[in-house]
Amino acid sequence: MTKSELNKFKNILEAKQAELAQFVRNREGIAIEKSPDALDEVQHAAERELAIRNLDRESNLLRNVRAALRRIDEGTFGVCLHCEEDISPKRLAAVPWTAFCIQCQEIADRNQNGEGSESLDDLLVNAA
């Protein structure tokens, strides 16, 4: 990967990091609100649950963006953390904070959803 491509990805990731950091700092949606009406209580609880899920998702994404920035600094950006093959430029353009190539990500997703019975290592060994 060229220096200019790395700088482009670094700029994209730094902008995303700033955006996510701002979102994560805003925690007003998770405040517990009391209401004399039981239906309002239920509505507030549902809104709070949604805000917590969004905060969790954005926090995870922020961690992934920061890890990608570290990989740029370490010189390992664009290389799959598992199989150590280059990640396709199209994938990096779509998801610059990705740590895995498409194949390893699909295997990891299947295992995370409980669909796969084999580990990522077992599947990669069998595919080779």
Image (cartoon, grey):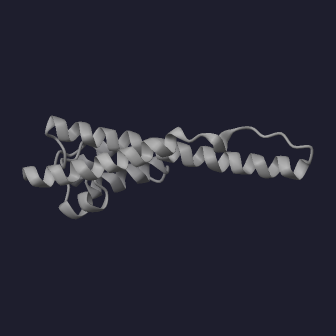
Asked whether residue 59 is in view, the answer is yes
* Quadrant position of residue 94: bottom left
- In this picture, is 126 found above or below 59? below
In this view, the residue in front, 91 or 21, is: 21
Q: Residue furthest bottom?
A: 90
Give the total number of marks visible in the rendering: 0
Q: Is residue 117 left or right of residue 15?
A: right
Residue drawn 34% across and 44% down? 65
- x and y percentages locating residue 75 in the rendered image: 13, 39
- x and y percentages locating residue 43 in the rendered image: 79, 52
In this view, the residue in front, 116 or 65, is: 65
* Quadrant position of residue 74: top left
Residue drawn 45% across and 47% down? 112
Residue drawn 22% across and 64% down? 90
- x and y percentages locating residue 125 in the rendered image: 23, 46
Q: Residue furthest left?
A: 2
Q: Is residue 104 left or right of residue 34?
A: left
In this view, the residue in front, 122 or 120, is: 120
Residue drawn 38% across and 44% down? 18
- x and y percentages locating residue 78 in the rendered image: 19, 49
Q: Is residue 3 left or right of residue 82?
A: left
Asked whether residue 1 is in view, the answer is no
Q: Is residue 72 left or right of residue 51?
A: left
